[in-house]
């Protein structure tokens, strides 16, 4: 049957082999349709890459905060026994930068209130015995660490020293 189709198409003046040329203009994809499909695919890939980029940044943020907290704890741990001694006020740890502030703190600033019930003291303290002992001092320590992405992590604590 294949030979009869070839002979039939040759008699009609059609020089193309049977099955290769078709009279229907919509038989294949036009260039415009292919370009539209490529643009749609590129837009989809762009949206997908932005979504994955945002997810990656979101996954990286907790790691930065944990690293910033570790740096702040290290800075606080390195404060000398006497916060009155000179301390570095700022510095860098890798790609992170930090600022340190130390200030004296009183119990009134902590928001302590008078006790609701009177406190009875068994015996009065001896002022001469306490004069030779170092008196504890309370300090507020504030460390602000800036992450590489620009996020700031603030750690505030109190430190008591015998001085």
Image (tube, helix red, strand yellow):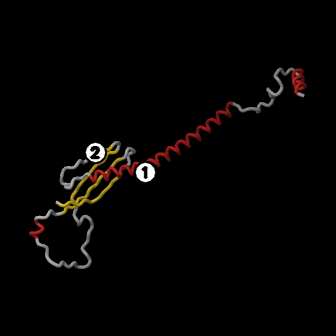
Q: Residues within 10 Å of mark 2 (few under 14, many from 20)?
A: few
The residue nearer to you, when weighing 25 against 120, is 120
User: Disc 2 or 1, which lies upstream in sequence?
Assistant: 1
What percent of the width, then of the height, locates residue 135?
A: 16, 63
Q: Is residue 84 above or below residue 46?
A: below
Q: Is residue 28 left or right of residue 78?
A: right
**Which residue is located at x 23 percent, y 47 percent?**
88
Q: Write down the quadrant of residue 118 in the picture.
A: bottom left
**Which residue is located at x 13 percent, y 64 percent?**
133
- Quadrant of the image containing the N terminus: top right
* Residue that badge 2 annotates: 91
The residue nearer to you, when weighing 84 against 125, is 125
Q: Secondary structure at mark 2?
A: strand
**Which residue is located at x 13 percent, y 73 percent?**
125
Question: How many marks are shown on the rendered structure?
Answer: 2
Give the number of the disc on residue 62: 1
- Quadrant of the image containing the C terminus: bottom left
Mark 2 and mark 1: Cα distance apart in space? 22 Å
Q: Write down the quadrant of residue 83 in the picture.
A: bottom left
């Amino acid at each position: 049957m294949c030979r009869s189709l070839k002979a039939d198409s040759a008699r009609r003046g059609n020089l193309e082999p049977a099955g290769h040329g078709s009279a229907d203009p919509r038989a294949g994809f036009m260039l415009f349709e292919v370009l539209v499909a490529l643009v749609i695919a590129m837009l989809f890939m762009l949206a997908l890459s932005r979504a994955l980029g945002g997810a990656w940044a979101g996954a990286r943020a907790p790691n930065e905060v944990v690293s910033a907290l570790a740096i702040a704890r290290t800075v606080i741990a390195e404060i000398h026994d006497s916060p009155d001694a000179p301390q570095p006020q700022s510095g860098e740890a890798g790609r992170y930068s930090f600022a340190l502030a130390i200030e004296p703190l009183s119990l009134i600033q902590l928001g302590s209130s008078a006790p609701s019930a009177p406190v009875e003291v068994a015996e009065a303290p001896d002022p001469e015995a306490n004069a030779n002992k170092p008196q504890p001092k309370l300090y507020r320590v504030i460390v602000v660490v800036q992450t590489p992405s620009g996020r700031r992590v603030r750690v505030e604590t109190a430190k008591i020293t015998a001085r």
